[in-house]
């Protein structure tokens, strides 16, 4: 059996056949890729900038010299005013007891049957006891009277600096110790 040679290959001066089908397909794919790339770049470049890119813009700082103050002359000088004289409150005489328990004066613990009066952290029998001020002890009255329950309460300071509230029924005005 004899094979028939390919007609184009038998010729000595002929080149191998050009694959037109593959060339056309490659050109078509290249064209589609270029169109897709152009469409993508067109959409990307025409979008408005987002907020984060606006925040990344540089800030220009301009340094300037501080302003030079200018001297001014006062045309209308104010007339001098007379300073008011200081009137001082007369000093209280703590050596004499006031007629009733008074803030800023002293008081004496009385009528407790020798037990003393309970000093509390607030103006009520519901408040916690702080200490006991003994019978006949002298205390400084700081504030009051404040109603609380069945008593009128006075804020006081003991000789050792302890402060609290005591019922007014157990206090009598007193001179300073």
Image (cartoon, rainbow, N blue to C red):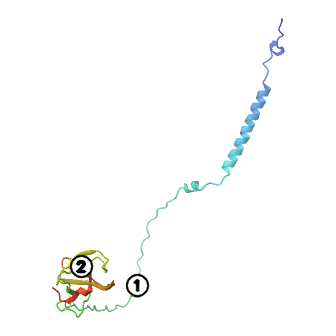
Secondary structure state at the residue bearing disc 1: loop
Q: CA distance from mark 2 to mark 1?
A: 67 Å
Q: Disc 2 on helix, strand or loop? A: strand
Q: For the view shown, which residue lies furthest in the left direction?
A: 177
Furthest-top residue in view? 1
Query: Where's the C terminus, which quadrant?
Result: bottom left
Q: Quadrant of residue 74?
A: bottom left
Q: Is residue 145 left or right of residue 114?
A: right
Q: Residue at x 72, y 41 (%)?
A: 36
Residue in the image at 42% along x and 76% along y: 70
Residue closer to the observer: 1 or 108: 108
Instruction: Please state the horizontal and vertical placement of residue 46, each as a whole percent of the image.
Output: 68, 51
Instruction: State the residue position of label 1.
Output: 74
**34 left or right of 117 in image:** right
Q: Front-most of 118 and 57?
A: 118
Dot 2 corresponds to which residue?
Answer: 118
In this rendered view, identify the residue nearer to me: 147 or 42.
147
Residue 87 in the image: above or below residue 36: below
Q: Examine the rendered structure and indicate whether residue 38 appears above or below residue 20.
A: below
* 28 vs 108: above or below: above
Horizontal and vertical percent position of residue 65: 44, 65
How many discs mark residues in the rendered view?
2
Which of the two labelled residues, at mark 2 and mark 1, occupies the earlier sequence position?
1
Q: Is residue 172 above or below residue 63?
A: below
> Residue extending furthest front?
113
Q: Quadrant of residue 97?
A: bottom left
User: Which dot, 2 or 1, sits closer to the camera?
Assistant: 2
x%, y% of residue 20?
Answer: 79, 26
* CB atoms of marks 2 and 1 within 8 Å: no
* 10 Å crowding of disc 2: few (<14), some (14-19), many (20+): many
Percent across and percent down for residue 35 are 73, 41
141 relative position to 80: left or right: left
């Amino acid at each position: 059996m004899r094979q028939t040679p390919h007609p184009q290959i038998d010729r000595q001066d002929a080149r191998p056949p050009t694959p037109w089908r593959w060339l056309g397909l490659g050109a078509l794919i290249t064209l589609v890729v270029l169109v897709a790339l152009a469409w993508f770049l067109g959409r990307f470049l025409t979008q408005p900038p987002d907020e984060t890119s606006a925040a990344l813009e540089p800030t220009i700082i301009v340094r300037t010299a501080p302003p030079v103050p200018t001297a001014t002359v006062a045309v209308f000088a104010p007339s001098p005013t007379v300073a008011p004289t200081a009137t001082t409150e007369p000093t209280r005489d703590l050596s004499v007891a006031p007629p009733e328990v008074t803030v800023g004066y002293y008081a004496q613990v009385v009528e407790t049957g020798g037990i003393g009066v309970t000093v509390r952290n607030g103006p009520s029998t519901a408040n916690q006891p702080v200490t006991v001020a003994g019978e006949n002890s002298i205390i400084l009255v700081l504030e009051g009277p404040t109603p609380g329950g069945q008593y009128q309460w006075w804020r006081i300071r003991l000789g050792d600096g302890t402060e609290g509230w005591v019922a007014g029924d157990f206090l009598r005005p007193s001179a300073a110790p």
